[in-house]
Amino acid sequence: MRVERRSVHDREILRLAVPALGALAVEPLYILVDTAIVGHLGTDPLGGLAVAGSVLVAVFGIFNF
């Protein structure tokens, strides 16, 4: 029988990881809703949103990892 011991840092890691995981899970939904709403405004606003969405994904990636 193998007993696993938890590190004293496990709780701190989990405290930091759960919000980051939540942000990574919600971010694509945020962009999807924005695309659905802005898509009704025309192609120019939708093109601008595509650029802004790419920047947002890059920023999320940089600050979460």
Image (cartoon, rainbow, N blue to C red):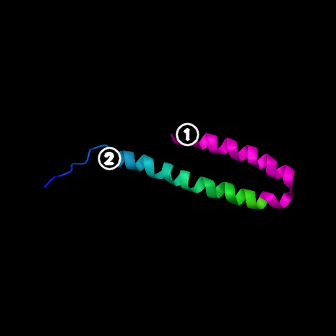
Q: How much space separates mark 1 and mark 2, taking CA atoms? A: 21 Å
Q: Amino acid at mark 2?
A: Asp
Outermost residue, top side: 62
Tell me what residue is drawn at x 17 percent, y 52 percent.
3
Magenta range is 38-65
Q: Left or right: 2 with respect to 21?
A: left
Q: Left or right: 49 with respect to 61?
A: right
Name the one closer to the observer, 48 or 10: 48
Cβ–Cβ under 8 Å for marks 1 and 2: no
> Percent from the top left, x then y, of residue 57?
63, 45
**Figure quadrant of residue 60:** top right
Residues packed near mark 2 inside 10 Å, few (<14), some (14 to 19) or many (20 plus): few
Tell me what residue is drawn at x 68 percent, y 41 percent.
55
Quickly name the residue at label 1: 63
Tell me what residue is drawn at x 80 percent, y 46 percent.
48
Q: For the residue labelled by badge 2, is the local secondary structure a helix, a strand or a loop?
A: helix
Q: For the residue labelled by badge 1, is the local secondary structure a helix, a strand or a loop?
A: helix
Quickly name the residue at label 2: 10
> Percent from the top left, x then y, of residue 11?
34, 49
